[in-house]
Amino acid sequence: MRIALTGGSGYIGSAVIAELVRAGHQVTALVRSGASADRVAGLGALPVVGDLFEPAWVAEQFAGADAVAHLAATGDATTAQLDRSVVAAAKEAGLPYVHTSGIWLWGDNPAITEESPVQPPELTAWRIPVEETVLTSGLVVTIVAPGIVHGHGGGSVAGSFAAARTPGGKVPLVGDGSQHWTTVHVDDLAVLYRIVLERGEGLGYVIAASGHNPTVRELGEAVGDVQPETPDESRRRLGAPFADALLLDQQAAGTKARTLGWTPARPTMLDDLRRP
């Protein structure tokens, strides 16, 4: 297949390119800088440098592909506009489209499925109107919603959690650490993207969760001695929007993804944290 994607130089996107290239697909990666172009070229993709906020340019690059995927994010408030721009480009191109969401969309829930009610924290509430636009676009759409991504020492949440220390050298928990986090290894996640792209079907939401849902205390104790916080202490340390997302108590099994032939097999987040 000929697959065009955004975000190929990022943590998840790099793993997706590597997985697609290994499977024999031709990948065009839309990037925003020469450095990113060099990175995706090194992974085996054809880089195209331009402005992802320009729907006409993005749609032109999508043309000729068999399917497209959007994994890019700015890491700030402009991500919502980026998503809207890429969705507009995907609608113009009219190709099977894979969009990226996240598990926080479903809020506190001990058994999240794709049919669970959405109740996002402030940090990700902007996703709802964007993704409603995606789902009503008339495109053949799949929205992949990953849990907290880890593996190879990366992942913004996993990496920052493992590195944080109090002045006394302890691992600060988020809250008292009793909440569960859904998790997925970046390489397993890349396999799921490949599967849904190859299928080319409108699957709606697909939760990418390994079924490993450790508590935050378990994760902290895998790294060292822990120090619980009150929710307000975590909000002061991390900022209220981010802390409130991390304070969510979530569990998911990824059952729908498994019915597609996905079998997560990489190390768990606990295994990653326990490694020297």
Image: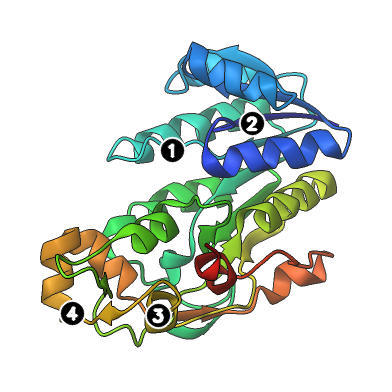
Of tags 1 and 3, which is closer to the observer?
3
Of tags 4 and 3, which is closer to the observer?
3
**Up-down: is 133 above or below 34?**
below
Q: Earlier in the sequence, mark 2 or mark 4?
A: 2
Q: Secondary structure at mark 4?
A: loop
Q: Earlier in the sequence, mark 1 or mark 3?
A: 1
**Viewport quadrant of the N terminus:** top right
Cα–Cα gap, marks 2 and 3: 38 Å
Q: Residues within 10 Å of mark 2 (few under 14, many from 20)?
A: many
Q: Earlier in the sequence, mark 2 or mark 1?
A: 2
Of tags 2 and 3, which is closer to the observer?
3
Q: Nearer the viewer, residue 53 or 45?
A: 45
Q: Secondary structure at mark 2?
A: strand
Q: Which residue is mark 3?
A: 221
Of tags 2 and 4, which is closer to the observer?
4
Asked whether residue 94 appears in the rendered view, the answer is: yes
Which residue is pictured at 43% across the width and 38% down the height? Answer: 73
Cα–Cα gap, marks 4 and 3: 14 Å
Q: Which residue is mark 2?
A: 5
Please indicate whether residue 143 sits to the left or right of residue 154 in the image: right
Q: Residues within 10 Å of mark 1 (few under 14, many from 20)?
A: some
Q: Which residue is mark 4?
A: 229
